[in-house]
Amino acid sequence: MEEIEKNEATERDDIFSTSVRAGKRTYYFDVKSTRNGDYYLTITERKRHYRDDGSFEVEKHKIFLYREDFEKFTEILNESIQYINENAPEIHYNREESPEHQSFSEVDFEDLEK
């Protein structure tokens, strides 16, 4: 994951927000409040898909995570990450050596927006 941004949210039901840019995806973590004042977390994945004509569409996926589920969610998330770290084959990503990247220069349009 590349870039982390944190800020205090300003809307009534938005308590805290932070985001992580990870390659072509951005993950948003937003703490919000319910009508009765309890807090919950939304996790949003946002990714742009570019069309052949240069236009794009944004794909979003959102998870709502409530306080009563934090412990179970954290437990299974940690268990899953541990399993991957211990069992997944090692893959080395070197874009320079990949045959599909040798014949042309790759342009990431998200980088041009900066």
Image (cartoon, rainbow, N blue to C red):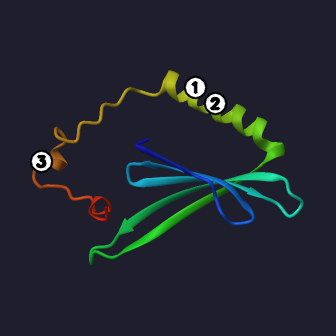
Q: Amino acid at mark 2?
A: Asn
SS under mark 2:
helix
Depth check: give the residue in front, 32 or 43. 32
Q: Residue at x 38, y 54 (%)?
A: 24
Return the mark for residue 102.
3
Q: Quadrant of the N terminus?
A: top left
Depth check: give the residue in front, 6 or 30. 6
| Circles 2, 1 touching at the beta carbon (< 8 Å) | yes
Residue 67, image x, y percentages: 80, 45
Return the mark for residue 20.
none
Disc 2/disc 1 C-alpha distance (Å) = 6 Å
Badge 2 is on which residue?
A: 78
The first of marks 3 and 1 along the sequence is 1
Q: Is residue 44 left or right of residue 71?
A: left
Q: Residue at x 17, y 40 (%)?
A: 96
Disc 3/disc 1 C-alpha distance (Å) = 35 Å
Residue 64, image x, y percentages: 71, 55
